[in-house]
Amino acid sequence: DGGITQSPKYLFRKEGQNVTLSCEQNLNHDAMYWYRQDPGQGLRLIYYSQIVNDFQKGDIAEGYSVSREKKESFPLTVTSAQKNPTAFYLCASSTLVAAYEQYFGPGTRLTVT
Amino acid sequence: QKEVEQNSGPLSVPEGAIASLNCTYSDRGSQSFFWYRQYSGKSPELIMSIYSNGDKEDGRFTAQLNKASQYVSLLIRDSQPSDSATYLCAVNRDSSYKLIFGSGTRLLVRP
């Protein structure tokens, strides 16, 4: 089955710890994205990547880092510098031709206490 | 002013009725418009895209776009309880790959 997988579904961490969220796709999409969603809010773009070994900051990149070493994978690290890391994190992918038609993974709900 | 604005709802309609969801956007340069459906606790799912003024129909869904008024809407005909979800409007920002999302309208379809 083609799709986007994110793991884990739920993640709990103590304040001050870095945590890495996984995102893998087998859709052969070139572009991948990370969004954050807070309760009652829309999605906000953290980082996006259009090609391997290249990525750009979105609107709320502070306190986050990413890598794109493989086309299929786009992991997100939430660092201790992120002031309010508790949120629902969504990974998406798209082709470059239809970049705005983005397909989402199931999400990771991160709770930091 | 938010870049993409939606009424948070909830919009409550009886089963079988037409649900009308609205969205306004601020960037006159936006060219691409999308509706995503998000069930509680789940990820968004793309249900409609529209790029030119007028109506676009897909099954029970119709997207309407009016660029002059900077307004996009989604009509759901013959609403079903399974349509109960939050509907997110998304608009492209300039010529980048960025989508800007509204905060969503929660739709409740009463049996």
Image (cartoon, coloured by chain):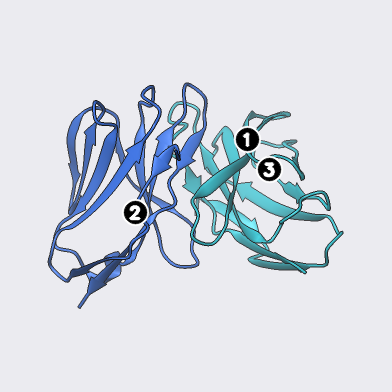
Chain colours: A cyan, B blue
- In the drawing, does residue B98 fall left or right of residue B58? right
How many C-alpha atoms fall within 10 Å of the one at disc 2: few (<14), some, or many (≥20)? Answer: some
Q: Which chain carries label 3?
A: A
Which mark, residue A74?
3
Give the amino acid at mark 2.
Asn
Q: Image point 15% across, 57% down: which residue?
A: B77
The Cα–Cα distance between marks 2 and 1, rounded to whole angstroms, is 25 Å
What element does badge 3 sit on?
Answer: loop
Q: Where is residue A110 in the image (x, y as percent from the top left)?
A: 68, 63
| Residue depth check, mark 2 versus mark 1: number of the one nearer the observer | 2
**Residue B38 higher or lower than A79, as above or below:** below
Kind of residue at badge 3? Phe
Mark 1–mark 3 distance (CA, rounded to whole Å): 14 Å
Q: Mark 2 lies on which chain?
A: B
Q: List the residue tagged with mark 1.
A: A58
Q: Pointer 1 and pointer 3: residues touching (CB < 8 Å)?
A: no
Name the residue: 74% across, 41% down. Answer: A62
Same chain assignment for discs 1 and 3: yes
Q: Is mark 1 on a helix, strand or loop?
A: loop
| A66 relative to A51, above or below | below
Left or right: A36, with A42 as reference point: right
Image position of B102 (left or right of B109):
right
Residue A33 percent location from the top left of the image: 59, 40
Across and down, in percent, residue B67 comes to 26, 28
Give the label on residue B7, or none: 2
Judge the density around disc 1: few (<14), some (14-19), many (≥20) Cα neighbours within 10 Å.
some
Figure quadrant of residue A29: top right
Residue at image point 77% right, 69% down: A113
